[in-house]
Image (cartoon, rainbow, N blue to C red):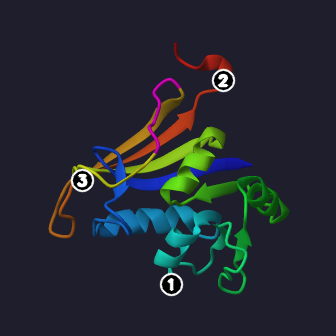
Amino acid sequence: MIITLIAALSEDGFISRSHGVPWDLPDDRKHFRQYTAGRCLLLGRTTYQEMNGWFTDHKPLVLTRDATFRPQPGHRRVPTVPLALFYAQQQQAKELIVCGGAQTYAATIPLAHKLVITRVHDRLGSGIAFPAIDPQRWIEITRIEHPADAHHAHAMTFLTYHSLPQGRRRA
């Protein structure tokens, strides 16, 4: 099973100032929805709650240690990443898409095969950081530039990275 992290991040590596996505970028939302449609998702509890209403045909797994947390019907709470992988495999998922937040990204990036990144051409200066994309481990596969326009206050670049196999990592 492929593990993919999907995120929008600023040029200086932040996904948020404190909570929620700090940009209103309709084409990024469209990109996210198209990529995740019908797929198995892994989200931290806070991100899951912030995205309430987004899940139509998705299969969310909510990573939280809070045993009292109850996600919506048809969604599942998982206390650990290995258990999330187990449930995704039980659902015969070919890909598990990690949607945040920062702790969930940090826990899964060592296992990831692919990154689907929207690089927003804006600097937040501080906030909640996405894990560093190590050029020794990740190779850029695709790049699509999107200029700022009447609907997008910031230009953005849609990037896809693949993980280099351990024996082929750059020195």
Three-letter amino acid code at the position of disc 3: Leu
Residue tagged 1? 53
Q: Is residue 93 visible?
A: no
| Residue at (44, 38) in percent of width and height | 132
Compared with 153, 103 (above or below) is: above
Residue 89 - label: none
Mark 1 residue element = loop
Three-letter amino acid code at the position of disc 1: Gly
Q: Nearer the viewer, mark 3 or mark 2?
A: 3
* Residue 20 coordinates in the image, percent (x, y): 38, 69
- Quadrant housing residue 8: bottom left
Q: Nearer the viewer, mark 3 or mark 1?
A: 3
| Left or right of residue 11, residue 52 in this image | right
Pick whichever of labels 3 and 1 is earlier in the sequence: 1
**Residue 159 inside the magenta-drawn segment:** no
Rounded to the nearest angstrom, the CA distance separating label 3 from label 2 is: 33 Å
Pick whichever of labels 3 and 2 is earlier in the sequence: 3
* Whether label 3 touches label 2, CB < 8 Å: no
Compared with 78, 70 (above or below) is: below
Q: Which residues, given as a range, are shown in magenta?
A: 131-136
**Residue 133 inside the magenta-drawn segment:** yes
Please identify the dominant SS of the magenta region.
Answer: loop
* Residue 49 coordinates in the image, percent (x, y): 52, 78
Three-letter amino acid code at the position of disc 2: Gln
Residue tagged 3? 124
Residue tagged 2? 166
